[in-house]
Amino acid sequence: MIKLSFGLDKKDGKIYHISEVRNGLDCNCICPHCKQDLIACNNGTKQEYHFRHYIEECKYALETALHLFAKEVIDKHKKIRVPQFSVNSYIERIEVLPEKDMYFEKIELESLKFKGIIDKPLLTISYPLQIMVNC
Ligand SMILES: [Zn+2]
């Protein structure tokens, strides 16, 4: 079973990895899904470091945590690496090279809508792009 590695800080609302917080309830974190207090178990040598719920475990903590973490990574780096895909326009069909980095000038995390720029040799296009983060 994969253990919960991320918690949501009560004060700043950001997602933190288990290695970044204090041990026990001093981690000051809540579950990203059910908002219960979390206990950081990061002080021993016998178990993998992880968070556990203070009262009762919930089913979607890990999924919600990974979703929030992915959004923070995209927002921080303002880019994603995408596999080959094609974009159709009214004028022409544009093929995009494989494993191309896409850089974003504007990111709206709440709605998961991105305005992206794809740079190709001799061509730059700009259009809104929506990305769904699935875990
Ligand atoms: Zn929970």
Image (cartoon, rainbow, N blue to C red):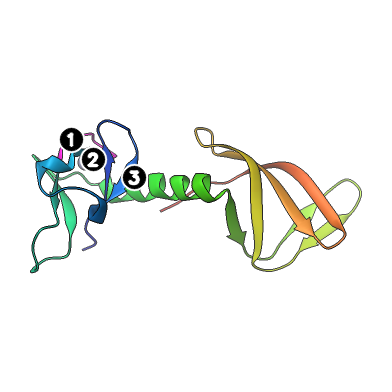
- Mark 2, Cα crowd under 10 Å, few <14 / some 14-19 / many 20+, is many
Q: Is residue 48 visible?
A: yes
CA–CA distance in space, label 2 to label 3: 9 Å
Q: Which residue is drawn at 8% across and 63% down?
A: 44
Residue type at the position of mark 3: Thr
Q: Where is residue 75 in the image (x, y as percent from the top left)?
A: 51, 44
- Give me the disc on residue 64: 3
- Cβ of mark 3 under 8 A from ligand 1: yes
Indicate the secondary structure of the residue bearing disc 3: helix
Q: Residue at x 19, y 44 (%)?
A: 58
- Give me the disc on residue 36: 1
- Cβ of mark 1 under 8 A from ligand 1: yes
Q: Which of 117 and 89 is in front in this view?
A: 117
Q: Is residue 5 visible?
A: no
Q: Which of 39 and 59 is in front in this view?
A: 39
- Give me the disc on residue 31: 2
Tag 2 near tag 3, CB within 8 Å = yes
Secondary structure mainly formed by the magenta segment: loop
Residue type at the position of mark 1: Gln
Residue furthest to the top in view is 11
- For the record, the magenta segment spans 30-38
